[in-house]
Amino acid sequence: MPRNTLVNTGLNLLGLDYKPLTVTIAAMEADTHFGFEQVSPNEKEGRVMAVFSSVADKYDVMNDLMSGGMHRLWKFRMRQCSAVRQNHVVLDVAAGSGDIALGHLRKMGDTGRVILSDLNGPMLHEGARRMLDAGYLPGRADCIQADGSCLPFADAIMDCVSIAFGIRNFVAIEAGLAEFYRVLKPGGQFICLEFSRPVLPFLGVIYDTYSFHMIPQIGEWVTGDRDSYQYLVESIRRFPDQKRFSHLITQAGFDLVRHENMTGGIVALHRGYKL
Ligand SMILES: C[S@@+](CC[C@H](N)C(=O)[O-])C[C@H]1O[C@@H](n2cnc3c(N)ncnc32)[C@H](O)[C@@H]1O
């Protein structure tokens, strides 16, 4: 699949700047992991894309089933904490079916623009369909198929960069954070919702039992694809915990980095600013 393909036009105003692929390739030399398996970076990217292509049309219903609707509360809190305002230009990376982008647009009111960006075509199509249904596309939303660790945007043009449940799938997390920093304006906010580590006693055991036994089973019943949901569970365990992720965000250049735990640390909301 070609990277950084323009799916929908309308971004000329934002100063689109296609960067050479070498950025991503350089960041992909060392071995990485796909869930609990050690794989090459190319293999990881191919398999992650296969997961999301497979689940795209059932993604929203599975989110509700797996989280018991909790993902809506987590995303609501993200919207409350985002610095998104009227007239802002906001990039939602790994936008998928568009929940976060819709939240941004509602928070902005009548002005401002959201770019939904995702590496996976079928997931991005779900997002584009929802933007069309809500009347935001064309005009207020754009959909760009791009790798979050090699963004096709000029420096310092975004007021806010958000990502929800996406960054743990990246082959190169640090390269992604560096890109988010690069495209933000000075004063811009980075906000990230991601699965993290339970901090309440006993919650970890209950959560492990639920995720390793129930989630792949629900995935099989609803989508007929157990392996994709096994990967999702394993990828959560491989992702850095709250403190390590804060450290990575700080290393990428962000200031005032902090996080808050939700549902006992099952999910964490991280924020940082480009000052
Ligand atoms: C779990 S979904 C989250 C979708 C949406 N943000 C939400 O919260 O409902 C993860 C998304 O990350 C996307 N993704 C994975 N790796 C990516 C990458 N390197 N760059 C951009 N998007 C990526 C997938 O295609 C998928 O749509």
Image (tube, rainbow, N blue to C red):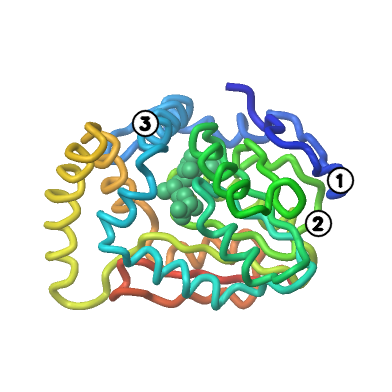
Inter-mark Cα distance, 2 to 1: 8 Å
Instruction: Write down the quadrant of residue 57 in the picture.
Output: top left
Question: Does residue 91 appear left or right of residue 43 in this picture?
Answer: right
Circle 1 sits on which residue? Answer: 15
Give SS at disc 3. Answer: helix
- Whether label 3 lies within 8 Å of ligand 1 gets the answer no
- Amino acid, disc 2: Ile
Inter-mark Cα distance, 3 to 2: 33 Å
Give SS at disc 1. Answer: loop
Asked if marks 2 and 1 touch (Cβ < 8 Å), the reply is yes
- Amino acid, disc 1: Gly
Where does residue 141 sit, x and y in percent of width and height? 70, 51
Looking at the rendered image, the quarter that the C terminus falls into is: bottom right
> Does residue 65 show up?
yes
Q: Which mark is residue 54?
A: 3
Q: Residues within 10 Å of mark 3 (few under 14, many from 20)?
A: some
Q: Nearer the viewer, residue 243 or 49?
A: 49
Circle 2 sits on which residue? Answer: 157
- Amino acid, disc 3: Ser
Q: Residue at x 86, y 42 (%)?
A: 12
Q: Residue at x 67, y 35 (%)?
A: 23
Where does residue 105 sit, x and y in percent of width and height? 65, 63
